[in-house]
Image (cartoon, rainbow, N blue to C red):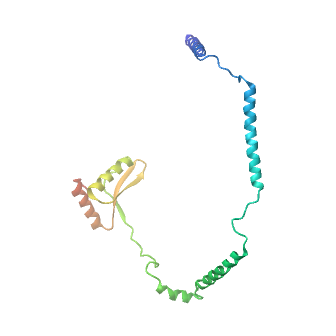
Amino acid sequence: MFRILGFLIGSATSIAVILLVMGMPEFHAKDAEITQQRFDAAVEKLMAKKQDAEVGANEPVESPLPDDDSKIAAVDPLIEESQAEVEILQPQFADTESEMLANTDDLPASLEEPPLLHELQWYSFWNPFRSEIAASGFVAQLERVTGMDYRVVKIKPGVYEVAFAYDDDAERHAKLAQISAATGLDLPDS
């Protein structure tokens, strides 16, 4: 009870001190005529802008092109020449499937189907980390020391493994040996 009473007395005292220092606020304009004049001036400016916009929209737009028929006649031969070139450049298509198959030998090597790339395998060689940040830090240090490419693989939330790519078992053993030699870590299968 005393706390509530103290809060109310303190709040009232604070408001009274603020009013004494700042003075009583005025909620109404001192001169209504000045306010009305400012409002009327703003309305007049808006109406003037609206009338200018309406006048500008109703004016005819001048064409940037001249009305000379001589200039149009000078352009016509150019249009006819460009159409003749277009007709010459149109490609000719094969009529039958056998003609299409016969022309595939002439294709450059870049347009032929690329050879299928074999898919690299990834080998996880270290105990899983609990955070991606820790695994990424480990990868950064390994890349700096060994110069090889590593990936952080998310197995599930809270389980991140570090892996490297390899083609066959010989390459995997060689990379494990390289990591062991560069870092001094005792890795299995190295």
Residue 96 to residue 158: above or below = below
Residue 114 in the image: state x and y as whole percent: 43, 75
Residue 43 to residue 55: above or below = above
Closer to us: 164 or 34: 34
Residue 167 in the image: state x and y as whole percent: 33, 67
Residue drawn at (74%, 31%) of the image: 37
Residue drawn at (32%, 51%) of the image: 138
Is residue 133 something that shows in the picture? yes
Closer to us: 123 or 93: 93
Residue 99 to residue 150: above or below = below
Residue drawn at (70%, 78%) of the image: 73
Residue 108 in the image: state x and y as whole percent: 45, 82
Quarter of the picture containing the N terminus is top right
Label tally: 0
- Residue 89, by quadrant, is bottom right
Quarter of the picture containing the C terminus is bottom left
Left or right: 127 as drawn, with respect to 85: left
- Residue 69, by quadrant, is bottom right
Residue 155 in the image: state x and y as whole percent: 41, 53
Left or right: 16 as drawn, with respect to 170: right
